[in-house]
Every structure is written in C-alpha cells, then in structure tokens.
Image (cartoon, grey):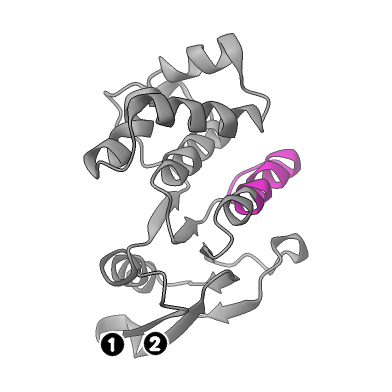
Amino acid sequence: MPDTVNRVALEITGGETGGIELELDRGHVYHAIVRSTAVRKTLIERLVDTAGATIVTADGGLIGNLKVWENLVLPATYHGSSQNRELEERSTGLFAQFGISGAAFETLCTTLPDHLGRFERRLCAFVRAMLTEPRIIVYDSLFDGLSREETGKVLTFDRIFHAQIPLGTSLHLSADLPTLPELGAHRTFTL
C-alpha cells in the first residue's frame, strides 16, 4: 500500500459472504467478529492480495521442519527487505520486550516449532510479521485458548506494532470474542 493511501477499501462478494464492504483507515485498530470460516478465509485472502497485509495466526503459521530463526527471517529475506544482521537486531529487541534475551533467545531460535507453547508460537508469528514492516497486520484468533496473563502479552503485540509503525493498521479477527476494552479498537465489525 503506497504511503499516500490513507484508507483501504475492500468489497468482498459471492459465496457465503453475501457482500461485505470494509474500509480500514491507516493508524487505526479494528476488531472483526467473523463467525464463518469461509468469510474469514476470503477476508484474509483479499487483505493479503489487495492490501499487502501480513497475517499473524493462532497456530503461528510456522514451518515445522525449519528452526524458529529460519521461520522468522524467511519472509523478510524472501522479499529482500533486510539483511541478517538487521533482522537479528530487530528480532532481539522485539523478543526482549517479552523477557526473552541472551541464552533464552538463542535457545528459542534453534528450536523447532513443534516444541513451542501456544503463546510462544504466536509471539514468533508476531516477530516474523514485524520483520517485514507491514502496513496492515491481521491478528487471526490470537486470544483463543490463552491464559489471562498471555492475553495481556498478546495485547502488547498491537501496542508495539503501532509504536514502531504509527500509520500501520491492525485488524483483530475473532469468531465470538466480545470486544476487549484493552484492544483499543476504533471500530468493531460483525461479519
């Protein structure tokens, strides 16, 4: 999305969608309650294809036979946006905000995704997304199955995103989650 675009407008028609129009302003936080998996899938596809959004999924979306570090840098190096040294510095800083540094960071980076807990997978997915410097970040069902403490940490993802990319737009997708006041959503949609 070019820097001059202040709003992303999506129109999704056909299938189970029944026709959805969605407008997202830069720098805003949104929450969408999407009960249909078909609508969710279509929405995510359109956001990625049309607006270049980056998705942070509940399962982390990590490739099982690649170590965490390889998973983290794959999208950024594929798109040629950063060098390994810069990626390491940025990822170290992001993980440090969650108390993971030094030997713990090194251990995490050499771990296979199957050995990660629910929150760790989501954290890795968030860091991977941040390394691509997204304009739009979509959090797909990140609060599902987390403890209260972990939910608080996931809420921190969006604060970090907006602090580092002030004009970035974030969209939280959930199947039935009531709006969390802590989310700070400018608007909630039910699709």
Per the rendered image, the range of residues in magenta is 143-159
Residue at figure coordinates x 54%, y 31% from the top left: 120
Residues marked 1 and 2 touching at CB (< 8 Å): yes
Q: Image quadrant for the N terminus?
A: bottom left
Foreground residue among 131 and 137: 131
Q: Residues within 10 Å of mark 1 (few under 14, many from 20)?
A: few
Q: Position of residue 188 (x, y in %)?
A: 61, 77
Residue at figure coordinates x 29%, y 24% from the top left: 66
Label 1 and label 2: CA atoms lie apart by 6 Å
Mark toward the start of the polypeptide (1 vs 2): 1
Identify residue type, mark 2: Ile
Query: In this figure, which residue is indicated by the disc labeled 1?
Result: 13
Give residue 100's quadrant in the image.
top right
Q: Position of residue 139 (x, y in %)?
A: 50, 56
- Disc number at residue 20? 2
Q: Residues within 10 Å of mark 2 (few under 14, many from 20)?
A: few
